[in-house]
Image (cartoon, rainbow, N blue to C red):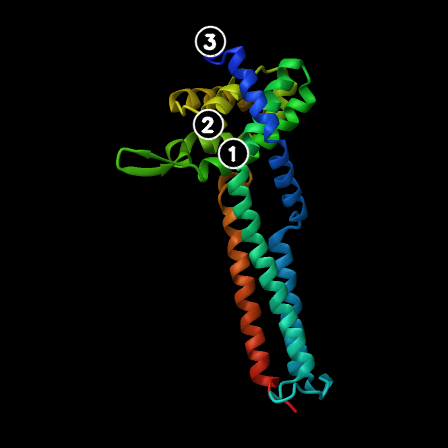
Amino acid sequence: MKERQESQISNERKRALIKESNESVDSVKSLVVLRQIYSTPRMFLNSMQICFYTVYAIYLYLNPEVLPSETIPFLGWNASLTLISLATIIFALVTFFDFFHVKRKTKQKIKEYCLFTSISSAKCLESGDKVRAAFYAEKFFRAFPIFTGNTKFEIGPWKTSLAEVFEHDIKEFYYSRKAIGPTIMKGETLSDEFYSLADQLFSKDAPSNYDIVQESLRKIIESTKPYRRKELTFFDKHPKLKGTLAELSEYVKLTIVLIISFILWLIFGYAK
């Protein structure tokens, strides 16, 4: 396998891939910065917002005398409650749209991110820098399932995603994400496989030979199996669930905040 892939990825092609990877640095940096700003665990933040506003609403309901008596001219709504409710709704909307903004940007730049991390790992492996190679490989392993889930292609009259075509291999790849570091540190040479994936999937003129892609994926997966955890966690067994729960929590948070605000308005909105 190694000899076959070396004949396919010539030194000239490697140089072209490295050049393309270097050109994607700024785009990758912007994505990394965006995700770092957004690094607060989303479900935790949403739960805190809901708990705070729920407790606040119950407190007001039980102690209505604590509300100031000022009202908004012409409307007659309680000024303090209205301002607090608006601030809470605006914050909920900002975090809601921010979540989907980051998600959209990630989809747009994930291909360049995968190119940069796979090529960087391959380069470091060739130079003997195992620590950096393991670092880039771990980043690549975490990003690759996102790329396959959002990359569509046509087979005859049907359109499908890479994740559906390589479903078993993608799951195995995901299971190996925490094992790739030890695999590289133990001396496994996977630079050809990383170059092959970059050449076939992430470059601007990728030929997308899926037989080669599958062969490279399986070679990497097999090399990581001895270093995997013996027991998978719940989220390891259900890799899509964490992302689904994070997205669902955004809708639940916004819905609950709007409902509580409406209930408070009904109870105190016309107080004078």
Q: Which residue type does callout 3 highlight?
A: Ser
Disc 3 is placed on an element classified as helix
Q: Residue at x 47, y 24 (%)?
A: 217
Q: Which residue type does callout 1 highlight?
A: Lys
Disc 1 is placed on an element classified as helix
**Residue 87, how many percent across, how many down?**
65, 70
- Res 201 label: 2
Quarter location, residue 124: top right
Along the line of sight, which residue is nearer the eye, 171 or 101?
101
Along the line of sight, which residue is nearer the eye, 171 or 271?
271
* Circles 2, 1 touching at the beta carbon (< 8 Å): yes
Q: Which residue is mark 3?
A: 7
* Circles 1, 3 touching at the beta carbon (< 8 Å): no
Looking at the rendered structure, the number of numbered marks drawn on it comes to 3
The crowd level at tag 1 (other Cα within 10 Å; few <14, some 14-19, many 20+) is: many
Q: Which quadrant would the N terminus be assigned to in this image?
A: top left
Q: Seen from this angle, which residue lies furthest bottom?
A: 272
- Res 111 label: 1
Q: Is residue 51 above or below residue 219?
A: below
Q: CA distance from mark 3 to mark 2?
A: 18 Å
Disc 2 is placed on an element classified as helix
Q: Earlier in the sequence, mark 1 or mark 3?
A: 3
Q: Is residue 21 above or below residue 81?
A: above
Q: Is residue 142 left or right of residue 56?
A: left
Q: CA distance from mark 2 to mark 1?
A: 8 Å
Q: Residue at x 57, y 53 (%)?
A: 99
Q: CA distance from mark 1 to mark 3?
A: 25 Å
Q: Which residue type does callout 2 highlight?
A: Leu
Is residue 179 in view? no
**Residue 178, how many percent across, how many down?**
60, 31
Q: Residue at x 63, y 25 (%)?
A: 181
**Residue 235, how many percent across, how many down?**
54, 42
